[in-house]
Structure formats: structure tokens, C-alpha cells
Image: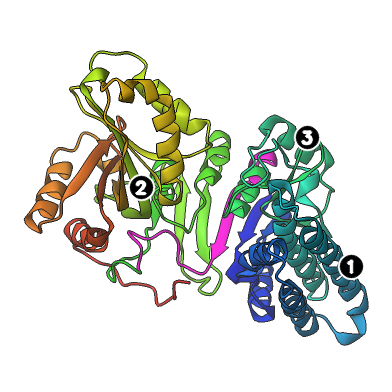
Amino acid sequence: MLVLKFGGTSVANAGAIRQLISILREKNNPKMLVVVSAMSKVTDLLISLYQKAATHDVTYLELLSQLESKHMEAIEELVPMSQQIDIKGRIKMIFRELEDLCRGIYLLDELSDSTKARVMAYGERLSSAIVSVAFQHHGLPNILVDSRDFIQTDNNYLNAKVNLKATYAFMRDNLPQADLLVAPGFIARSADGKTTVLGRGGSDYTASLYAAALNAELLEIWSDVDGMYTTDPRKAAAAYSIEELSYEEAMELAYFGAKVLYPPTIAPLVAAKIPLVLKNTFNPAHKGTLISANPAPSAQNVKGISCIDHIAVLTISGSGMVGVPGVAMRMFKAVALECINVYFITQSSSEQSITIGLAEAEGEKAAQAITEEFAGDIEQGLLNPVSVETPMSIVAIVGNGMVQQPGIAGKAFSLLGDHNINIRAIAQGATERIISVVLNTNDAHRAVNLLHDRFFLTVPEKSTATLA
């Protein structure tokens, strides 16, 4: 079994879908499962759709019409006119459902997370239906399945947590037997039957769940770039694609901003020991990036430089923290209760301060939660008020070759210091495969370029593929 996932740009229009079909025709695998994202930009448009409806902006109807036209145009280019009736009827029915849902939002002022998830799910439902029919009419018989029937989650509708045991059982026991299956990514259902979604980028995760459940020999994720790069090519022109990475290296790079891969994707593959290849739909001859448990040895200690922008840095400090157990626990509990993800943690050795980094959009909410938790300590003067610094960025240096390799951190810090770039905070994991620093966002772009030039002096011939 081969599982392939195609991203939004890979199904963006009829031309991209034809390219996808040509890729499948080159495969020799007797059994394949194809997971597709929504057409490029459609999820953003669906979010705009429910936002307009919720604010009584009647132009949501115009946006709905534009979305319908976009999908109908793809059908008209991919399917012979004489055979368009059935698929157009199905697509129109889906759009009437969506219109009714948006009318309810408009009239009732009801916009819960559950409703948002229902609207966002339409992108993958539409694209998978069109891709399945296109396959049929281009000599690739297939069965279309609904991932909501197989992926069970909790009720965190917009970033749902998967019940792996139930999901794997549903997939193994109930997926139809066919040489080619097509499934929408991103969408799932809660145990009580409500539509949920797996977070932006969640189609990668969908594909890895299918791969793990079915014990696939390989997962291929196809996008519009030649794999995972040494750094973001938009920030460093000398960036180039990496041939091989370990699971751990790929996970760290993805977590710290390498958007070609959704971070949770790796975990199911590690447990099942399934390799992953990142490939370019529009440059299929390029070998891409192979991610596995045992990548080929490399002379390169550092594999990549990642960067996350739009970070808020929060610090709690004061003499009242010294030697007092449970301070960190209380801080993280306060943030966790607000469902806020923490990217970065560091604590002074004197125990007088703890600094965390999180999404800038959640900075004030996190600061309020921490302030409420420590209100008594702050009032007594034991702790200082929570400080919030923005805009900040986290720059991470990643590589298995850094393990027990002296001097990597020293080279990085010395380089940044020589160029008058101030480091606000530093963290290094016990695994030694990542060093991360917090910088002012105004310095981040320059820091990435300097570090990339320092650790990647020999640059192979770069792909000419464009980065979306």
C-alpha cells in the first residue's frame, strides 16, 4: 500500500489535477490511497465566508457564488460535457448545504467552533469529489471515502485530538477493498458524530493516520516545493532542499516553522516505522526529501535553520520564586487551561525567572491567565507583574550531527554577537539536536541568513521550482 497526499496547490485547478493524474499513472503500486486538501486558498475563503455571514455582510452570497464557480470550472475542464451532469449535481447539492448553513449563521448570529468546523470541512469534501471523478474519467477507477467515517476525535472542533485506537480500528475494519481509494484530508468526526477538523495543515496528518493504520510501505506528501529546505528560501536565497532527514530532525524543523510539513504528521509514522518522502507535484523528477528512522550518514552537523515569527515572550520573575516548588507548574497550568501552545521555555538557574514563547495573537490572553494565577504573589510584592515582549521571533538550529559536537552553539552566538544581534533568550533540548534563540523580529531575517551562510557554505545546485 502506498499513501499519497496532495496539497492545495496540487489540486488548485484542472491543470494541477491533470499533473496529479500523470504522477499516479507512473506508479507501479497495486494499491494506493490518495488524500487531498481543499483547492488552494479555498479554506481561507470559507473562513471569510462564515465571518461575513456572522457580521450580517450580505456579500457572503457573492463569495459563495465565486467558490461554486471555481469548482464548476474545474469539472468542466476535467470531465467530458456529456458526463458532467452527475458530478455537477453533487457539487450543487453540497453548495446548497453550505448556503443553508451560512444563512443560519446570518440569521441566528450563531457561530460556534462546531459551526466553523462544519463550514471549513466543505473545502476537502468538494475537492475530493472532483478529484475522484477526474480519476474515473482519466482511466483511474477508484472509490471515494469520507474521512469523517474513519477518523474519530474529541470535541475540540478546530484542532481536534485524534482517538488513535478507534481511528485505526475503523480504518482497518471498514475501508473498502479497492486498488485506488480517494479521501479528503483535514476532516474528522467527534465520538458524538459532529464534524471536526485537524488544524490548518491537518491533511498531512490525515495521510499519516491512513499510512499507519494500513501499514503502508511509504507515505508521499506532494506540494509545490522540492522537499524540506535548509531554511526558508524566502528568507535566505541560498537555501536548498535536504536529501535526507531523521524523523526527529524533520519534526523539529516542522515545529519551528518549516511549513512544508505539518508537525503532528511524523508521530504515527515513527510508531509504524513508515518512511516519508516530500515531493514537488510540479517538478516530480526531483528526488525530494526522504524522512526515515535511519537516514544516510551526512558530513553536515546542522541540517536546517528554522524561524517562527509573530511570537510573544512572557516572563514571570521575582525573588519570591527562589526555592519555591510548583511555580512553573502553576504557570504552565494557567496557560494550558486557555488551550495555548507554548513554543519555547527557559528558566534562570537562580530560579528568579521563567520565560516562555507563544503565538503573538495569544500573548495578552496568556498574560492575563498568568496574572490571575499569581495575583496574590504579585500583590504581596513576591513576584513582578508579567512582562510581555513583542514582536519577537524564534530561530532554531537543528541537526542530529550536533549531538555531542562541541562548538555549534558557540559559533552561532559568536556570529550573532559580532553582528550586533541581541539574543533575548536561549534554550537547548537535552537531546542536543536543537538550539533555539529568541530575537527581536527586526533581527530575525538577518540572523537566519547569517547562520545559514555559516553552517551551509557549500551550496548544491538549487531547484528552479517556485515557492508558493
User: Circle 1 — which element?
Assistant: helix
Tag nearer the camera, 1 or 2: 2
Q: Any magenta on residue 9?
A: no
Query: Which numbered marker is on residue 312?
Result: 2
- Picture quadrant where residue 168 is located: top right
Q: Looking at the image, is mark 1 or mark 2 earlier in the sequence?
A: 1
Highlighted range, magenta: 211-233
Badge 3: residue crowd in 10 Å (few <14, some 14–19, many ≥20) = some
Q: Which residue is mark 1?
A: 93
Instruction: Find the distance from the CA under tag 2 to the CA under tag 3.
Output: 35 Å
**In x, y percent, where is residue 289?**
44, 57
Looking at the rendered structure, the kind of residue marked 2 is Ala
Instruction: Find the distance from the CA under tag 3 to the CA under tag 1.
Output: 26 Å
Looking at the rendered structure, the kind of residue marked 1 is Met
Q: Which residue is mark 3?
A: 191
Height in image: 407 above or below 40?
above
Whether residue 293 is visible, yes or no, is no
- Picture quadrant where residue 59 is located: bottom right
Q: Looking at the image, is mark 3 or mark 1 earlier in the sequence?
A: 1
Tag nearer the camera, 2 or 3: 2
User: Circle 2 — which element?
Assistant: strand
Q: How is the image coloured?
A: rainbow
Residue extending farthest to the left is 418
Residue at image x 21%, y 28%? 348
Looking at the rendered structure, the kind of residue marked 3 is Ala
